[in-house]
Image (tube, rainbow, N blue to C red):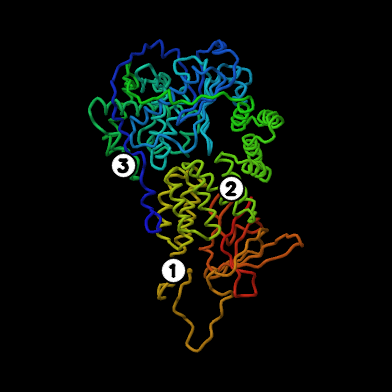
Amino acid sequence: MAGGRLDTAGLARGDLRDLLIDYKLVLTTKQFDETIFATMSRRFLILCALAIVGCGPLLAADSAPLEVKSTHFTVTTDANEKDARRILDNFERMRWMFQTLFPKTNVDPASPILVMAMKNRRSFQAIEPEQYLAKGQLNLAGLFLKTQDKNYVLVRLDAEGEHPFATVFHEYTHLQFSSASDWMPLWLNEGLAEFFQNTDFHDKDVVLGQASIDDILYLREHPIIPLADLFRIDHNSPYYHEESKASVFYAESWALTHYLQVRDREKGTHQVHDYTVLMSQHQDPVTAAEKAFGNLKQLQSDLEFYARQRQYKQFILSSASAPLDPGSYRVRSLTPSQYDVRRADFMANVGRKKDARALLETVMAGEPANAEARETLGLLEMVDGNQEAARKWYGEAVKLDSQSYLAHYYFAALTLRSGDSAQNTQVETSLRSAIRLNPSFAAAYDMLSTFYAMQHKNLEEAKTLNMRAVEMDRSNLSYRLNAENLLMMQGDWDDAEKVLKLAAPLAKTPDEAAQIKSRLDQIRAIRDLKEKSKNGPSESGDGLVLVESSVPVGAAGPAPKHPLEPATGPKHFVTGVLHDVACSEPAILELHIAVTTKTGKTQLVLYASNYYKLDLSAIGFTPKAEMNPCKDIEGMKARVQYAESSDKSVDGQMIAVELLQ
């Protein structure tokens, strides 16, 4: 942000351009016997303890649950302190490994990483997703759950198998590279996750890049995807969604990533780095690959040969000098209520709502003023669509001086959705509290930015807040669209267009792509309108365009239906149902809103002198495409901000319209 203008160039910069793994590593070779391949089956992307025959022994006698916490991870466990420290050490070393290999990457996500380390199968099954409890289902050893505001890891400490936590490490890798998702191609994103998922930690070194037997076997039995096609696969491709095609996509992505990393290391080249630089500049993926890797037909031939080898190289990273400080870990015993609230929160996030509620009712019976229990009850109500009940629970948590940034954030978000303008002061206070409690939580910055935009105040601060959110979470399309909306509100069409074009690669569904296209079309329509007025001397700051009159001198032209004046009169909010929506040239929007008050029902007539500058947003739902105020809002419930107008034939001029679910 400079001089109050949104730094649109900053939106193009990738945070993870240097993917050249400058290994402080030793290359070693591992040979695989064909009989091993013959016994392996293809692994689906779910973590299985394939070597587990039965329940392992308990790791510790029953004792008080513990919390063991470092600066970067929080482990909650029913095992002993030694086991909790061991799992925390592994995660800290995984984090250190990424920080060492990718020094330009921010390895710490904004949302906390919460590890639920269960000592045995019984305690693991007490909170794992319900679908895995049925007879004949796979025995999970762990899973990684990313929500909007938390990163949950569930691990079973008695798990066996060569790489029992492969899926956890796979998803943790995705978390590390999430800031590059606006430009990183899908094959490389998945290839790196497969590359790191077989990482092993030993006393003084880390073994990574171990060959994936499953992937090798699969590639030997199935034809690979032509590289020109592989490089173009995105989230909408059947190769990413259909199981029969996804298997070869994952296997080939691993093989190509592994082959290129080893080749770069052996030959002293930096082709992967060159490729990522080109992709961060949003070049065509096939063109970028040809520039970085050379002839793609030759590369494909080399890859097919690579999959038929009997030996593969892996990397050893010395971790003897890793700056880990187990002495800094904070250990405390948890009360049964504290432990149950954490288990309930995890279960609420994996869909075990009934069990979560039962635990929380027990906690509330013993501790009626438990703020954490209220936060999870708010989550359960929100998941069920009971927004007012959710707001009640989060509001009570806030009143109990909750130190949870999420309680403050969700109370504010739900209050905004409710249209309760009487709570505006508390909304602003709660959002600022959320930022204070977690300065890395992007959603709170964006929500406060949206709040100011809705109020049409502090717009420069709103842009600063939104830019901060974009910088912290570059993969979030919603933040980019909010940036575009702020620019549109101030008539900065050029920068708004730049933001949309940079946001286009983040669209993961056809609806999201259509939404961006619709907004770009809207900007083009505005430009057309301005072009029609090009003979006029200027456009004023309130969006009015002065044009040369085509009415003959001495003739009286028709007066505008409503005065084209800035919305500077006293401002009000009203919530109701929109109807009789109509548009007229050049960009006039008029509608009626049916309002129910304490004294009965009434109708207001409102207008906008330039509907292109009307702040139109959706609260509580995501439209399938960009909403056209002239034809898509009829019959919808909305919260409208308007200013009193000099035209007494209407009740006011609209400033913002929030469509409600």
> Residue 33 in the image: x percent, y percent?
37, 11
Q: Nearer the viewer, mark 2 or mark 1?
A: 2
Q: Residue at x 53, y 36 (%)?
A: 147
Q: CA distance from mark 3 to mark 2?
A: 39 Å
The disc labelled 3 sits on which kind of residue? Leu
Q: Can see residue 315?
A: no
> Does the CB distance between marks 3 and 2 fall below 8 Å?
no
Could you say which quadrant of the image residue 306 lies in?
Answer: top left
Observer-nearest residue: 220 or 255? Answer: 255
Q: CA distance from mark 2 to mark 1?
A: 36 Å
> Residue 373 in the image: x percent, y percent?
64, 34
Estimate how packed mark 1 is, as few (under 14), some (14 to 19) or many (20 or more) residues with alpha carbons within 10 Å.
some
> Does the CB distance between marks 1 and 3 fall below 8 Å?
no
Which residue is under mark 3?
278
Which numbered disc covers residue 413?
Answer: 2
Q: Residue at x 48, y 68 (%)?
A: 543
The disc labelled 1 sits on which kind of residue? Lys
Q: Can see residue 65?
A: yes
579 to 564, vertically: above or below? above
Q: Judging from the image, what secondary structure is the residue with disc 3 in?
A: helix
Could you say which quadrant of the image residue 355 lies in?
Answer: top right
Which residue is under mark 1?
530
Observer-nearest residue: 415 or 239? Answer: 415
> Residue 494 in the image: x percent, y percent?
40, 59
Q: Nearer the viewer, mark 3 or mark 2?
A: 2
638 to 111, vertically: above or below? below
